[in-house]
Amino acid sequence: MVNAIGRLSRSVFFDYPTKQTRTKIKIISVGHPLGPIKILRKNGPTETEQTISSSMIQRYAAAFKEGIPVNIDRVLGASYNTRSALEALLAHTPEFFLCRPHRVQFQESSTIIKTGHKHLIWNPREPHAEGVIQELPCALTISELPSVETVYGVLDFPIDVAPELDIEVKRRHTQIQIALALIGHQLGFRTYIAANDQGIQYNRKPLIELPGVIADLADERLLQAYSEGVDAARFIDCLWLKNGRFMPAVMEIEHSTGVTSGLNRMQRFKNSIPAFEQTRWAIVAPDEDREDVLKKCSETQFKNLKAQYFPYSAVEELYGLCMRRRITGVSEAFLDSFMETPVD
């Protein structure tokens, strides 16, 4: 995506896809390979320099699959005030087309199909001329379910819990930890939460009292014979166990600065226990950290771990499904559809 935009002219002001928009944009510079992109926005006589951030570019890029329309507002919500500029520049690159799929709209007890608003679609097999916006006829219909809000209760942290972390980072980390525990309970797993986090209060109760959460891995039949493994897993953020015979997932919740340490903890644990079948080793991290996580998971020293990336958005999507639909009876392979494996 960045390379494609980087090939556009620096001397031209580009239009927005919406004809009513009078603002135009010009590229000042492009940082390779992941951005940022500096632009000049022109609205009448007023010109303003702005930056399209690398994190926004990465989130938008991750949403595209060949032949599937993408609406930038559905991907980014109200975040980033330069999102329309990114969409406009991308629309001028050869492999991306403007399209307007139909949309199923829910109104009380009935549904109607309306002409949809603008989307971009990736069509690399039949590129158009560079520097122009090309609209692709689209017979697709999109059914957009109402968004699912994930609501968390009140958190209280003991003074000694991760004092090195910013309070908002700590809060987000714990919210995801809670979501994983509740997902595990709904899917029939027993969940272990890191020993140093078990005393965090959630809705005035410690995390250890969440349904299905266990206090000590040494009591689990699967690990009773492996004291070294129990010690190695003591501070891993979350483990799912099943039927005393399986360990569906081992998960470290990390921000970009902690990914390597999380991988190291999981590596030590894996090296101190037998090779259990179908265990997933996953780094759970914010969506904007995707590139960094996948890169570190691919490093030579972690190859045998075969670590996967479990984005926050996927955790909360799965959590929403579990809470709304009370999912049961699915195989552990179902989890793989929410995780991403690095490409060699």
Image (cartoon, rainbow, N blue to C red):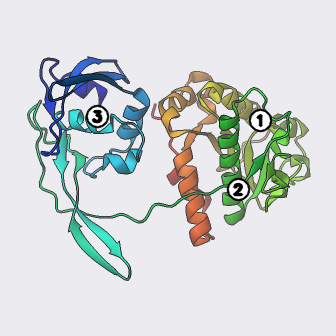
Element marked by disc 2 = loop
Q: Which residue is mark 3?
A: 86
Query: Disc 3 or 1, which lies upstream in sequence?
Result: 3
- Asked whether the residues under the numbered discs 3 and 1 touch, taking CB atoms below 8 Å apart as contact, a structural biologist would say no
Locate residue 23: give its quadrant.
top left
Structural crowding at the residue carrying mark 1, measured as other residues with C-alpha within 10 Å and reported as few (<14), some (14–19) or many (≥20):
many
Which amino acid type is shown beneath numbered disc 3? Leu
Above/below status of 270 relative to 106: above
The spot of residue 46 in percent (x, y) is 20, 25
The spot of residue 20 in percent (x, y) is 14, 46
Locate residue 96: give its quadrant.
top left
In the image, 140 versus 263, the foreground residue is 140
Can residue 231 be seen here?
Answer: yes
Which amino acid type is shown beneath numbered disc 2? Gly
Q: Check the image and name the residue furthest to the bottom.
A: 109
Viewer-side label of 3, 2: 2
Structural crowding at the residue carrying mark 2, measured as other residues with C-alpha within 10 Å and reported as few (<14), some (14–19) or many (≥20):
few
Q: Which residue is mark 1?
A: 269
Q: Which residue is mark 2?
A: 153
Element marked by disc 1 = helix
In the image, 33 versus 133, the foreground residue is 133
In the image, 252 versus 26, the foreground residue is 26
The spot of residue 312 in percent (x, y) is 56, 45
Query: Disc 3 or 2, which lies upstream in sequence?
Result: 3
Determine which of the numbered discs, if any, sits on residue 191 in the image: none
Which residue: 27% across, 23% down?
48
Which residue: 69% across, 30% down?
166
The spot of residue 98 in percent (x, y) is 17, 47
